[in-house]
Amino acid sequence: MLATPCLAWPFRPPGPNGLAFVEQGSNAEVAQCVAMVFTARPGDFIDGPELGLPDQTFREGGVSKSELSTAAHRWEPRAALSIGVGELRDLAQTVGVEVASNG
């Protein structure tokens, strides 16, 4: 049993073992919080209208490593990030993010 369980994100309907949980404060929980910040758009949440990251899909010059880092540190200060952004080629770009808990 987890010491302090949190619902796993993204939320999924219960399976044969019930709902999915992660340990609060674990690397998995911090990583899912960063993923939520990166996929949420400002205005998505009524209780936190500024939460999220502006859509990077059609950003001139490609994905901004600086914007990713700023959003992650603002909304998930427990995260220690390593972000790699590949070169924009043929309208495609790779982004790699490693997340670990600061604590």
Image: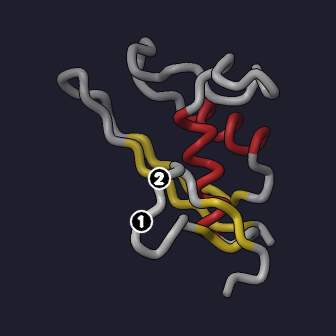
Location of mark 2 (residue)? 12
Location of mark 1 (residue)? 15
- Placement of 38 over or under 77, stated as above or below: above
| Image coordinates for residue 14, horizontal then vertical, percent | 47, 61
SS at circle 1: loop
> Could you tell me which residue is drawn at 53 percent across and 50 percent down?
11
Marks 2/1: CA–CA distance: 8 Å
> Could you tell me which residue is drawn at 63 percent across and 67 percent down?
100
- Placement of 85 over or under 30, stated as above or below: above
| Image coordinates for residue 20, horizontal then vertical, percent | 53, 66
- Placement of 49 over or under 51, stated as above or below: above
> Could you tell me which residue is drawn at 75 percent across and 69 percent down?
25
| Image coordinates for residue 26, horizontal then vertical, percent | 68, 72
In this view of the protein, which residue sits in the foreground, 73 or 24?
A: 24
In this view of the protein, which residue sits in the foreground, 86 or 58?
A: 58
| Image coordinates for residue 93, horizontal then vertical, percent | 31, 34
Q: Amino acid at mark 1?
A: Gly
Q: Quadrant of the C terminus?
A: bottom right
- Determine whether label 2 and label 1 are within 8 Å by CB: yes
- Placement of 88 over or under 37, stated as above or below: above
The label number, if any, that marks residue 93 in the structure image: none
Q: Amino acid at mark 2?
A: Arg
Q: Is residue 65 left or right of residue 52?
A: left
